[in-house]
Amino acid sequence: MATDAGQTNTDRPYLRIYFACANQYVRVYRRPDRACYIARCPQCSMTKTFRVGVGGTSNRFFELTCR
Ligand SMILES: [Zn+2]
């Protein structure tokens, strides 16, 4: 049976972020209490918030430069 009304949390959504600053790919999971993702640069600790969902982006891959 299919229930489309509720959310299925069987697999957690995530984004893949490439930090040019650190030359690393980072997988960012969504915060359970927010409809956003917070990516953190492993090199310089800069953070960037992505909003995903209705009205947001459906892109799953981003490249970030910290400058
Ligand atoms: Zn950085």
Image (cartoon, helix red, strand yellow):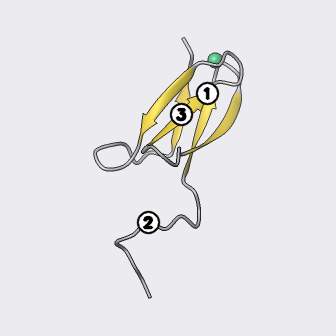
Q: Position of residue 38 (x, y in %)?
A: 53, 33
Instruction: Measure the alpha-carbon separation of dots 3 and 2.
Output: 21 Å
Q: Label 2 belongs to which residue? A: 7
Amino acid residing under circle 2: Gln
Amino acid residing under circle 3: Ile
Q: Earlier in the sequence, mark 2 or mark 1?
A: 2
Q: Earlier in the sequence, mark 3 or mark 2?
A: 2
Disc 2 packing (10 Å; few <14; some 14–19; many ≥20): few
The numbered disc on residue 38 is 3
- Decide: is 26 above or below 58: above
Q: Position of residue 20 (x, y in %)?
A: 63, 23
**Where is the C terminus found, in terms of image quarters?**
top right
Q: Determine the residue located farthest toward the front in the rendered image.
A: 33
Q: Position of residue 27 (x, y in %)?
A: 64, 42
Q: Label 1 belongs to which residue? A: 40
**Where is the N terminus found, in terms of image quarters?**
bottom left
- Decide: is 58 above or below 44: below
**Contact, CB < 8 Å: mark 1 with mark 3?**
yes
Secondary structure of residue under mark 3:
strand
Q: Position of residue 64 (x, y in %)?
A: 55, 25
Q: Determine the residue located farthest toward the top in the rendered image.
A: 67
Amino acid residing under circle 1: Arg
> Which residue appears at 61% of the width and 27% of the height?
40
Image position of 29 (left or right of 60): right
Disc 3 packing (10 Å; few <14; some 14–19; many ≥20): some
Instruction: Measure the alpha-carbon separation of dots 2 and 1.
Output: 26 Å
The numbered disc on residue 28 is none
